[in-house]
Image (cartoon, grey):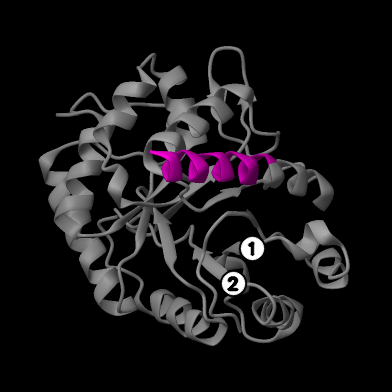
Amino acid sequence: MSNRLISGAGIGLRIPHIHDILAGQNDQAIANIPWFEIVVDNFLVEGGFNRTALRAISERYPLIFHGVALSLASLNPLNLDYLKAIKSLKDETGAEWYSEHLSFSSSGSSHFPDLLPLPYTEETIAHVSERIVQVQDIMGERMLIENISSYVSCQFNEMSEGEFIAEIVQRADCHLLLDINNAYVNSVNFGEHLGDYLSRIPASAVKQIHLAGFTDKDDFLLDAHNNPVTDEVWKVYAAFIRDNGPIPSMIEWDSDLPPLDTLLKERAIAERLLESAQQIGHCA
């Protein structure tokens, strides 16, 4: 179990790549991966290959946890058993932090196979902030919330997404996981100015960044995590870390999963940009 701090560019740990990672300690590109993020829901079942493999990974690399099933903004009571299982696994592996999406995916007894957007209202801010505080009390630490990609907007919105996120971060005293691909996708889908959005979020609260690829569906962009990071997203990312410092960043790839080498090449691009941001900071 590692006690190293999280810095630099990591990748999302996907189960088909675990064997290559564990067998590749003599491969410099694999050995240089500074940390992995796991989708924690894939590892909550006791025993079996997944847990054994995760334990082996945690002995060699720092980990961070990312959840997809909490339904943070739902009206349903928080699933305390789910959170306790995450906390137990976090203690077992020494993972550095836990993040979740600023969304909901359940209502009553219905569960939806997607991360659904929220109305940007004062009522939603109060509800979500209270829920985040509950999660942080259970976990015993501040969590990270992630901005999601959206394909519909609520007619009752009272503010922009950036203002909405900023207010929640302030009220709940939590951190932010900035998904730059999601922000870019939303800016295109809704015809909004990405610079305005990024100027409104509290950059000082951003503890981690996600980078991924989308699919162009002609009339909208789909956050599919199935392609390399686009040049446009790389440019936005480079500008953000130039202005705000070398924030730990990672490559997400979930659909049409390529060989590990492809993710390592993407990681290397992010690492070079982080190093450039660090150099700029030293010269400032």
Above or below, 188 against 169 in this view is above
* Mark 2 crowdedness (10 Å alpha carbons): few <14, some 14-19, many ≥20: many
Q: Which quarter of the figure has residue 240?
A: top left
Q: Which quarter of the figure has residue 158?
A: top left
Expressed as whole percent of the image width and height from the top left, the position of residue 40 reads: 55, 68
- Which residue type does callout 1 highlight? Pro
- Principal SS element in the magenta part? helix
* Quadrant location, the N terminus: bottom right
Q: Which residues are magenta?
A: 269-284
Rounded to the nearest angstrom, the CA distance separating label 2 from label 1 is 7 Å
State the mark number for residue 62: 2
Seen at 31% across and 74% down, the residue is: 141
Above or below, 124 against 182 in this view is below
Seen at 37% across and 58% down, the residue is: 144
Q: Is residue 149 visible?
A: no
Toward the viewer: 53 or 96? 96
Q: Would you say the residues marked 2 and 1 are in contact, meaning their CB atoms lie under 8 Å apart?
A: yes
Toward the viewer: 143 or 225? 143
